[in-house]
Image (cartoon, helix red, strand yellow):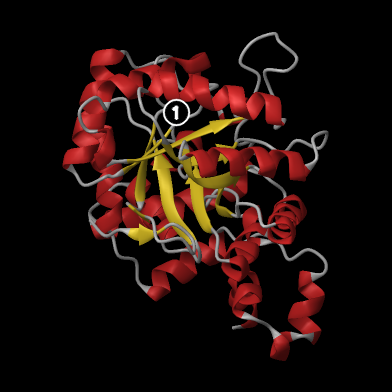
C-alpha cells in the first residue's frame, strides 16, 4: 500500500483510514479487534475515532484492540461535541480541551494522540484560546499534530492566520464530507487545502452507502435499508441527479470488474489534496472491498465522465471568474474551474 504525507507535514498515512464510529454502537469488542487486525494486516496504519462516538465506547474498544501494537498506527481522535449534560463538557474552550484529552488518552490506553482534531467550529470561543490550549498539549507531548473538521473555509482560514500570527500550532489537515454525491467542498475547502498545504481527510466517502451501487433508479432498495428521503447525513436534495451519477458509477465498476464502492473511493482518492478516505466496516468482506479501492486506477476519460455527471453548478463568483479571469488562475483555482475551461 502506498503512504501519503498528511498535508505539508512529514507524517505518512495510508490512503485508506479505518473509521471506528460504529465501534460500540454496532460493533462489539471481539468484532472491533478483528476489524483492526485485518486493517493492519492489509497495510492500513491510520485509524480515526472521536470522544463522542458512542460516548467514549469507540475509543475504549479501539484502545483494547490496539494493545501491544499502539505504536504501529497513526491514531486520530476528535473533541468538541457534547459528551454529557455538563454545559462545559463541549466546545473548544481551554478548560474542556485540557480535560477532554485526558479522557481520550485514558480510554485509548495511550500516552499520546497522533492527530487531535477539533470536531466542529466554536464561534463562542476565541481562536487564540483554542489554539493556545492545543499548543500546551503539543508542547507536553500528549498531542503530535492538530487538525480541524467540518469548518467553513473562512473559519479555517481565520484559524490558520491566527496560528501564524501568534506562533501557535497550525492545522495540518481538515476532515470534511466530500464524495461523488456532493462536491460542494470544491468551491472553497479543496482549493484552500491545495493553497495552504492541508491534507484532506474525507468522512463518508460513500455517502453513507448511497454510492455502494445498491440504490439505483428503478431497482428496489435492499430489505431493511433506508429510503433516499430518509438520509439526513448527507442529505439528498436531487434524487434524479444522484441516480444519474450512480448509473455511470455502476457501469464503470462493471467494466473494471470491481464494486461501485471501489470506483467511488478511487475517484475521491484521486482528487487534489485528498490524503485519505475514512471507511468503516462491519464485516471482513466489506473491509476487504473498501481496502481494494486503493489499487483501482481510473483513466483520465473515466474521471472526466464522473466529473461531468456529478458536477456542481458554478455559483458566483466562479462562473464570472471562469469567463473573465481564466488566464490568471492558480492551481488552487483550477481544482474547481479546470473542468469548466476545457
How many marks do you count on the picture? 1
State the residue lying farthest toward the front.
140
Give the farthest residue toward the bottom.
327
Q: Relative to the observer, which residue lies in front, 193 or 143? A: 143
Give left or right: position of 1 versus 221: left
Secondary structure, mark 1, is loop
**Residue 97 in the image, given as x and y percentages of width and height:** 63, 29
Task: Name the residue that disc number 1 marks.
Answer: 221
Q: Which of the 4 image quarters holds residue 10? A: bottom left
Residue 154 image offset from top left, x and y in percent = 77, 55
Report the residue that reaches farthest toward the top. 85
The residue located at (43%, 15%) in the rendering is 57
Closer-to-camera residue (185/262):
185
Tell which of 119 and 270 is nearer to you.
Answer: 119
Q: Residue at x 39, y 30 (%)?
A: 111
Residue 135 percent across, percent down from the top left:
60, 44
Give the vertical position of 78 relative to 72 (above or below). above
Quadrant in the picture for the C terminus: bottom right
Foreground of the two, 117 or 190: 117
Q: Which residue is found at the position 56% from the left and 46% from the top? A: 147
Q: Position of residue 317 (x, y in %)?
A: 82, 69
**Residue 339 in view here:** yes
Amino acid at each position: 500500500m502506498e503512504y501519503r504525507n498528511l498535508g505539508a507535514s512529514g507524517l505518512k498515512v495510508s490512503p485508506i483510514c479505518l473509521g471506528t464510529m460504529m465501534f460500540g454502537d454496532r460493533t462489539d469488542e471481539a468484532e472491533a479487534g478483528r476489524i483492526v487486525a485485518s486493517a493492519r494486516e492489509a497495510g492500513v496504519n491510520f485509524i480515526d475515532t472521536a470522544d463522542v462516538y458512542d460516548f467514549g465506547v469507540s475509543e475504549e474498544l479501539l484502545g483494547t484492540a490496539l494493545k501491544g501494537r499502539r505504536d504501529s498506527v497513526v491514531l486520530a481522535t476528535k473533541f468538541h461535541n457534547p459528551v454529557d449534560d455538563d454545559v462545559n463538557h463541549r466546545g473548544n474552550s481551554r478548560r474542556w480541551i485540557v480535560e477532554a484529552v485526558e479522557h481520550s488518552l485514558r480510554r485509548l490506553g495511550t500516552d499520546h494522540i497522533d492527530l487531535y482534531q477539533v470536531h466542529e467550529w466554536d464561534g463562542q470561543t476565541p481562536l487564540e484560546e483554542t489554539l493556545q490550549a492545543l499548543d500546551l498539549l503539543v508542547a507536553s507531548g500528549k498531542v503530535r499534530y492538530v487538525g480541524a473538521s467540518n469548518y467553513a473555509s473562512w473559519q479555517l482560514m481565520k484559524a490558520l492566520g491566527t496560528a501564524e500570527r501568534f506562533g501557535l500550532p497550525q492545522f495540518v489537515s481538515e476532515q470534511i464530507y466530500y464524495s461523488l454525491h456532493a462536491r460542494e467542498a470544491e468551491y472553497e475547502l479543496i482549493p484552500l487545502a491545495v493553497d495552504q498545504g492541508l491534507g484532506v481527510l474525507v468522512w463518508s466517502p460513500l455517502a453513507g452507502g448511497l454510492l455502494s451501487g445498491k440504490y439505483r433508479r428503478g431497482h428496489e432498495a435492499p430489505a431493511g435499508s433506508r429510503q433516499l428521503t430518509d438520509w439526513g447525513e448527507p442529505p439528498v436534495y436531487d434524487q434524479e441527479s444522484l441516480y444519474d451519477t450512480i448509473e455511470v458509477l455502476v457501469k464503470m465498476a462493471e467494466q473494471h470488474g470491481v464494486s461501485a464502492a471501489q470506483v467511488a473511493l478511487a475517484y475521491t482518492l484521486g482528487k487534489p489534496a485528498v490524503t485519505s478516505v475514512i471507511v468503516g466496516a462491519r464485516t471482513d468482506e466489506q473491509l476487504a472491498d473498501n481496502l481494494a479501492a486503493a489499487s483501482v486506477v481510473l483513466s483520465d476519460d473515466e474521471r472526466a465522465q464522473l466529473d461531468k455527471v456529478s458536477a456542481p453548478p458554478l455559483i458566483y463568483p466562479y462562473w464570472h471568474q471562469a469567463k473573465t479571469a481564466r488566464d490568471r488562475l492558480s492551481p488552487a483555482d483550477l481544482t474547481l474551474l479546470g473542468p469548466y475551461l476545457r
